[in-house]
Amino acid sequence: MSGKHFKGQEVSCCIKYFIFGFNIIFWLLGVAFLGIGLWAWSEKGVLSNISSITDLGGFDPVWLFLVVGGVMFILGFAGCIGALRENTFLLKFFSVFLGIIFFLELTAGVLAFVFKDWIKDQLNFFINNNIRAYRDDIDLQNLIDFTQEYWECCGAFGADDWNLNIYFNCTDSNPSREKCGVPFSCCTKDPAEDVINTQCGYDVRAKPDAEQKTYINVKGCVPQFEKWLQDNLTVVAGIFIGVALLQIFGICLAQNLISDIEAVRASW
């Protein structure tokens, strides 16, 4: 024997462990999101009565944690184990799954730009549908209150949208103390108040329109969201481009690792 050793092609350790490290963080975040979602459902008794999932008339925010957490868990698991075990099937699944998500995001962005009026109508329908279910779910209630406080708005297109809720409508048959009112999140903020006055919206819609402006934000959340989007268009676009580039980068790295693994196996 000559004693010479020929070094064959090797899998890039840098790419391999970069994909592994990135995806294990992604996977752990997915586990955390799923854990929060399941804990929230457990607190609301949904896990002990699965049929109650369909009882809520509005949107349950817990679905956001479960869907996002599930996608992150699947992607993170496929990328992490695929890179660590040099499993081309999992790596290809990771690439295709990430590519599908990128394509869906791109399609949604184009459709939102082309069909602006339709999106506005759907947003109006979505908000009004959740106004009806405001008191049905504490998580939905907190989400609506946060939205109205953050954008300083009330209802989809105005405070009168709260007539859709059985507790806040102005009909004579409504026995609720909140009749002809709005949630506290519609109220204008008083810097002098340290404690939130949760009754600030009582009877406010029974007052003249000009007087209502003194107590509540009269602008709707749909136009306020449009205004916020226009004011922060550069930041929003930057975030979307950054996420898209990160996805493309992840797909390219996975494809490079797959090529390395297949080349090494071909040389055996």
Image (cartoon, rainbow, N blue to C red):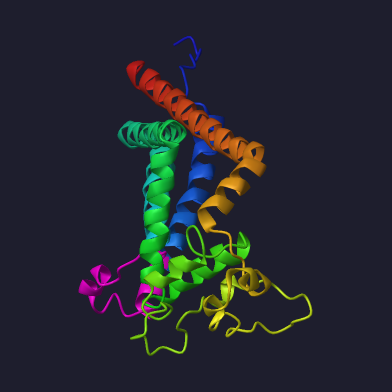
248 in relation to 141, above or below: above
Image quarter of the N terminus: top left
- What span is colored magenta in the figure? 37-62
In the image, is 102 to the left or to the right of 213? left
Name the residue at the right extreme: 192
120 in relation to 249, above or below: below
- Residue 259 spot, x, y in % from top left: 41, 21
68 in relation to 133, above or below: above
252 in relation to 175, above or below: above
User: Residue at left 39%, top 65%?
Assistant: 130
In the image, is 213 to the left or to the right of 263? right
- Residue 129 spot, x, y in % from top left: 35, 63
Image quarter of the C terminus: top left
The stretch drawn in magenta includes residue 140: no
Query: Is any part of residue 21 visible from this angle?
Result: yes
- Residue 81 spot, x, y in % from top left: 39, 44
Viewer-proximal residue among 255 and 261: 255
User: Residue at left 74%, top 82%?
Assistant: 193
Name the residue at the left extreme: 51
- Residue 173 spot, x, y in % from top left: 33, 86
User: Residue at left 44%, top 32%?
Assistant: 106
The quadrant holding residue 50 is bottom left
